[in-house]
Amino acid sequence: MSNSILEGETAGFRQTESAAGNVTVVMSMQQALNRALDEVLAENPKAVIFGEDCGRLGGVFRITDGLQSKHGENRVFDTPLAESGILGMSVGLAMAGFHPIPEVQFDGFAYPAINQIVCQIARMNYRSRGTLPMPITLRVPSFGGIRAPEHHGESLEALFAHVPGLKVVSPSNPHEAYHLLKYAATRPDPVIFMEPKSRYWQKGDVDAADGGSPEGAKVQREGRHLTLVAWGAMVARCLQVAELAAEDGIDIEVLDLRWLKPIDADALVASVRKTRRAVVVHEAPLTSGLGAEVAQLITQGCFDTLKAPVERVTGFDVPYPSGDLEDEYIPNIDRILFGIQRVLEYRRG
Amino acid sequence: MSNSILEGETAGFRQTESAAGNVTVVMSMQQALNRALDEVLAENPKAVIFGEDCGRLGGVFRITDGLQSKHGENRVFDTPLAESGILGMSVGLAMAGFHPIPEVQFDGFAYPAINQIVCQIARMNYRSRGTLPMPITLRVPSFGGIRAPEHHGESLEALFAHVPGLKVVSPSNPHEAYHLLKYAATRPDPVIFMEPKSRYWQKGDVDAADGGSPEGAKVQREGRHLTLVAWGAMVARCLQVAELAAEDGIDIEVLDLRWLKPIDADALVASVRKTRRAVVVHEAPLTSGLGAEVAQLITQGCFDTLKAPVERVTGFDVPYPSGDLEDEYIPNIDRILFGIQRVLEYRRG
Amino acid sequence: MDTLPLPDDSTAAAPPTPDQLRELYSLMTAVRHLDISAVAWQRQGIIPGYAPELGQEAAQVGSGYAVDTSRDFVFPTYREMGVARAMGVNMVEYMSTHKATWHGGLYDPMKSRLAPIQAVVAGSVLHAVGWAHGQTLDGSDGVALTYFGDGASSQGDVHEAMNFAAVMKAPVVFFIQNNGWAISVPTERQVAGGCVAGRAAGYGMPALQVDGNDVVAVLDATRHAFAHCRAGNGPVVIEAMTYRRGPHSTSDNPGRYRSLDEERDGAGEDPLRRFRERLLSEGLADEPFFAQAQASAATQAEDIRAGLEALGPRPGSEMFDLVFQETTPVLQSQAASWREESEHV
Amino acid sequence: MDTLPLPDDSTAAAPPTPDQLRELYSLMTAVRHLDISAVAWQRQGIIPGYAPELGQEAAQVGSGYAVDTSRDFVFPTYREMGVARAMGVNMVEYMSTHKATWHGGLYDPMKSRLAPIQAVVAGSVLHAVGWAHGQTLDGSDGVALTYFGDGASSQGDVHEAMNFAAVMKAPVVFFIQNNGWAISVPTERQVAGGCVAGRAAGYGMPALQVDGNDVVAVLDATRHAFAHCRAGNGPVVIEAMTYRRGPHSTSDNPGRYRSLDEERDGAGEDPLRRFRERLLSEGLADEPFFAQAQASAATQAEDIRAGLEALGPRPGSEMFDLVFQETTPVLQSQAASWREESEHV
Ligand SMILES: Cc1ncc(C[n+]2csc(CCOP(=O)(O)OP(=O)(O)O)c2C)c(N)n1
Ligand SMILES: Cc1ncc(C[n+]2csc(CCOP(=O)(O)OP(=O)(O)O)c2C)c(N)n1
Ligand SMILES: [Mg+2]
Ligand SMILES: [Mg+2]
């Protein structure tokens, strides 16, 4: 990992007042997440944060920076280096009435904990017939794009979304990050919170007072000709693509899926019924990726209006590569534009 | 688990000679798998079988019955009770030139080994630039239908199929079981071999001499009006459905997908270009299941000829239930027929 | 390995009174009877499967009896029927798991202080550590008691749990029933070093290895361990050496991997008979008492059988309703189409 | 914990000759120089990141030097640069992992007898056990040497590996570098019981705890352990007590979790300076030798830098070609469209 990625922002927030009188603050996603956690700890005495290096260090991405010194070692603490242990312990804490907010240090290190996530966290409410809820908010710095070592650039959303009993969400910008984390961390059910680590240091406006609905998908850009569906770090890229396409007169709608489970099928269908064309973009490998589900939901709901099969622009069916090749792997602007072109130029055979 | 399920067949095989002169033998899938493993051990001195209770007991499903006493304790052995250990050890054995054929006792107990499967087995060839191949054939008794305890009825194919570096296959009858296992267990790459445990004791013809191509999908029944796509235990059910539908004059093609990774998209497209309608059936939960991938591949390849969106008849987005409810959960004949009906009756809006 | 310095409050680990000893005997008798009955019910088709605990009555009843259900919490595997019984769990609701009614059982874990039945080997050992650490965070004095087998001790989760518990000084009792077998694999091919208790020292934890067929020894060890935990001294390992006298489950055929001679040698003395002789010789119980215990056990088993037979399948809608506390639109629509299609038929 | 009965063939564990001692010093000097250079290269933008092994030169060089690359096999983590160097691995190919060229490094693991760089903490400990058991099955006499840290010892896989190895008597040396820290977490909050070596007894395995800053002690312990394994006596644990003098990685800022005073107290004596003084005092080396070692180290580092700078990115087609031994139609078609779209641009 390059050093710059991990350097926190220390300056104060810049505030502006909107027309509606709401105060928006410019901050990075790291700051937004940190603030959300700070507030969750303050509001819920049963909320506890733990994981590898979450305490004194404040996390390798500084998302929990300062929280231990502010809220104490009982609320924010380091665990030994064992992900199954961290998640298994979360189950017990939830059974004891806590709201655990564990962190897995990087996406790829959720795998050692999958057994506890799938067989325990996701099922305990069901197994116990609703008497042992699992209000666990698992934060996972996710996705690629930072030239990191192996296993530090994985996209596990298709796996998580397939597991009954889990909910999965990923924010695309600081505003979403703040509101979605506050929402997720106050739910009575397990939520996997996938943070797009390549966006941690990008700044954006956060309106803390008005988040809009925290549920479902969100149109981040309206358009008429084609819908780009994305989540996490790919939303910003799709917005860039939409700007470029606009120069060619192509008016693209960008739908930020946000919730990867449950998926907001209504929003998908509403958007594509309007645009009649869709491309779904994700970093994960193509086969059995979440793009297939998205495409099928669109096809199911828009079969009679679709002008072309839904296109998928995704990572390849190869292990996430080392830094030198990651730009070849992650959908880049060109590949997304090619996908759009294929859809626009599609002619029935 | 009811006792009858685990009772092996001890009688000799019934042989018949086909028109082409091939000798077909009637045996159960348990017998076919056992014979395949026996032959693999005999043909490859580097093949080793191990797992929990695989040795002396011959496996809880008796798939490795008699192999330890025949081939010795160095070739077929019991391990301590730790799935990550079993799979992690497989990596080292493969690096030392062996062809490990580990068993995970039940589908749900693959989860503790997911880290070794995804991060190690699936990537070692890539990581080592092709110098450390992983010829590992992981047998996983899979899917539901036997009124078993929790975690004994899981369908992990969507997870496995999403992992770059794995190949995944599932046989639907004794003949397929024999040939696909012999093929899988002689490949230089990791193959997850998902055995439909509810079919272990069903008998069928096995033509050991002629297996046909071990690659790709296979049409198990030809038809003109609609394609049912399935794998594992659902193939037999779909064949039953096809018989019932035939009584109503509906001529259904049943495509046994066999390989869940890589998926034979050509076969899917060829079949549905002919029938113009498709329903995909699986036991796993709907969302982000492999049915989405299958549906999208069909839609992509047959968009201009499809008469209706591909329908999915699957398990629900709920944890696999206890025996009393499993018939409500697993796609039953009625639910598949309803799915067929929806496709046949689809009218553009 | 075999000593545990008694904490100050040593009355908490007082030896059982004669009444308690008789109660222990009655409980063991009831457990033995229910266990044998359940195997019969499986043969009769009343339940599809069962995991007998035959031979482990002393280990289970002795330890379960030590639990204070006003503050402790217990994490069972799939074989802790005797623990459940000793804790006073509703046995029809408990046995419903073996009727394939509901995986975790129908009993209320919060009220029973018994976590749902756990089919993942070693699956809940870490839960106990988390629950116990919750006691520390809350300043409460509950103790977590987690059961697992010699086979389970091989799982990575057990190591993580022991290490977490010892690092955090969590009030957990790790209770291993070393019954000699993990399905077909004997302890000597499973547990390097020969015993699980021997691992505790490596974590700086005390361990007690007890004769698991001696109910009083088990109770005593468990009470000591609870007192130790409650005094804030951190986790304890108890390894109860016992024997799985029956098959692994009603699907298993031990004849394939152990001989009757081996069984006889390995099993040692029957814990129930042994306890009975002790009570007799100490003059704490007599034949009429034993006969009465036996009769009561039979009645209880009959009641449980009747309860199980009366138990209908759970409504299919529970599949959908019990997934989340807050359901989702997708689940609601799946439930709706399930309802429609099943009513339609 | 600190004794290991020498196997019969004790020459295999003979003390190092003066030539070998000087070679060890040269290696440590080269490793130290390369390590410091790599941190500088990261600052200069030549490589995107690096995990320094500063302070662990004795532990790494001493153990790596004991390997017989004609028959043994070594399983590193992400921090074993010194081991790779001592084993004679091509260092441009090794360092390429830190240039983000290829995750596992470009060296050939089979020829180097060094498994690919492993970024999963504790990820390859079980591989060593499997490889070692393969030696037993083959009747070969190779030994697996697997490295991991104090932090890694908390992972379940390490327990499973130790238990498997001990049950199967696999010829594995578990080599822990206890460098005091797992990123920001100190050993005392990580390793219950205080040390990893203390766990071995629970598995019936011998363990050696050595001063990891004394290269001769490390070499000696490793040679003893290899001889023990080769003689068929099963696995051994070595815990080398050392200190991570640098940051966890070039992304880390240790100032956030430990003070300079703590660093000074914890680090103890510099292993390189200490060895130098020993060689001097024993009359085995002199200033010209040290100067020569230093000059050679500088040249080597320069060559490695040049090699790294010359290293272009791997062709994107390798992403597809190296997934399988037998490629698939799906991969081929993805490769084709990747090629088309990237050429098109
Ligand atoms: C993770 C996992 N792996 C495998 C199994 C299958 N299985 C069920 S019980 C059992 C043996 C357990 O032995 P032990 O822990 O000694 O407990 P016992 O059955 O003797 O009570 C096995 C292998 C399982 N339930 N969970
Ligand atoms: C399974 C896993 N979890 C988390 C990480 C992130 N991580 C990388 S190194 C490290 C600390 C390792 O400490 P230790 O084992 O003592 O080795 P050291 O870094 O001190 O050499 C962590 C938490 C990882 N790489 N793998
Ligand atoms: Mg056992
Ligand atoms: Mg360390």
Image (spheres, coloured by chain):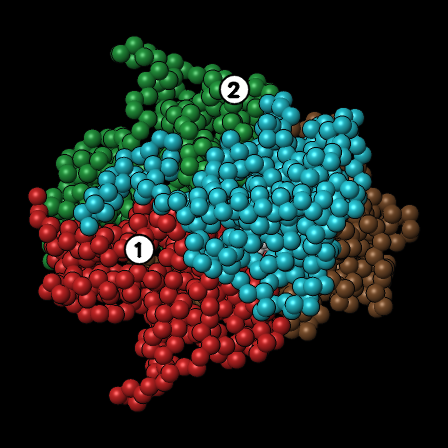
Chain colours: A green, B red, C cyan, D brown
In the displayed image of the protein, which residue is found farthest to the top?
A21
Corner quadrant of residue A68: top right
Q: Is mark 1 within 8 Å of ligand 1?
A: no
B265 versus D276 height, above or below: below
Name which residue lies at 85% across and 60% down.
D5
D34 versus A211 height, above or below: below
Residue D243 is situated, as x and y percent measured from the top left of the image, at 73, 40
The circle on residue A45 is 2
The type of residue carrying mark 1 is His
In the displayed image of the protein, which residue is found farthest to the bottom?
B21
Instruction: Give the chain of mark 1.
Output: B
Name which residue lies at 49% across and 47% down.
C302
Residue C284 is situated, as x and y percent measured from the top left of the image, at 75, 40
SS at badge 1: strand
| Labels 1 & 2 near each other (Cβ < 8 A) | no
SS at badge 2: loop
The circle on residue B282 is 1
